[in-house]
Amino acid sequence: MSMGHTRPLVALFMCLGTTNFACAIEMIDALIAERGVTECSSSGSSGGSTTSTNSGTTSASDTSSGTTELEVSTSSAEASTTSTDPETETGSSSSGPTPSVCGNGILEGDETCDDGNDASNDGCQECAKDSIVFVSSEYYQGYTLQGLYGADQRCRSLAGKAGLPNHLSYMAWLSTPTTPAVERLLHSKGRYVLVNGLVVAQDWDALISGALENPIIVDEMSQTKDDAVWTGTLFTGEPALGSEFCDDWEDSGAFEQAGVGSSMSVDANWSFFDYEPCGSEARLYCIEQ
């Protein structure tokens, strides 16, 4: 830049350093008159346009390119921020209810007890409380039970009258050809015990093993009852096929027959050992759920 071109600029800066604004305006006018006014194109214009200045020519495409790179960089950063980390996604998809921890002393999940110890004789085993089992104090004719529901209700009524806890949960050890006891009843990890505290089985698997620790010979009032019991069920919990099940334990007639067990037995006979006419009287096994 020549010295002639710098003089207006120097004078302008000198004026700006004072409070004489009129002087500054005159210098600006002089500068415009000497150098002229150039047009500036927007950086958003097409790539072929240019922006002219006295110091040289700058391609608008360069400016546009810079803007594009900035936008791409910003977009990449946003994508990086919002993208899902595979490990995070895996953890999120597998998240759900916190698994219960048996033995921590806190009742969680499907636990029915958690006493924080491994003692099996304190009413809580594998975080499942003991389930009471009894043989009914009353007799019933097989065809008057009013189905599986009616038999369950009889067990609940007896448990309630005896003041047993959780009495509305009781169900009868009873099957029909289409509804086995093994599918109706809860498979507890806890012990099955009599009202007097004697252990029948350590858990569900032991209950259906065909070898009980003590016979189910005590009723809801802790009285001994050595009798036949309506079951229609093998010791495995499956239906004892070959009998008529008293037409699913409903009103069908006294001359059909159904399977019975023996309350005195500790082998497979506890659940099934013979058939009895549906008009006969027998008891029920009732199990807390």
Image (tube, rainbow, N blue to C red):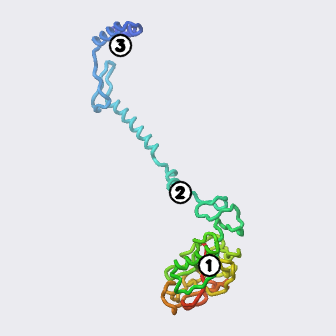
- Whole-percent x, y for residue 122 in the image: 71, 67
Which residue is under mark 3? 1
x%, y% of residue 169? 58, 71
On screen, residue 232 versus residue 130, left or right, reads left
Q: How crowded is mark 3: few (under 14 residues within 10 Å), some or many (20 or more)?
A: few
| Residue depicted at x 67% and y 82% | 217
The residue type indicated by label 3 comes to: Met
What's the residue at 59%, 80% (across, down)?
236
Earlier in the chain: of badge 2 and badge 3, it is 3
Q: Quadrant of residue 276?
A: bottom right
Q: What residue type is labelled 2?
A: Gly
Q: In what quadrant of the picture does the N terminus appear? A: top left
- Secondary structure beneath dot 1 equals loop
Q: Mark 2 points at which residue?
A: 96
Q: Do the residues labelled 2 and 1 touch (CB within 8 Å)?
A: no
Q: Earlier in the sequence, mark 3 or mark 1?
A: 3
Q: Work out whether residue 228 can be spotted.
A: yes
Mark-to-mark CA distance, 2 and 3: 74 Å
- Give the alpha-carbon distance from disc 2 to disc 1, as whole Å: 34 Å
Front one among 194 and 35: 194
Residue corresponding to mark 1: 208
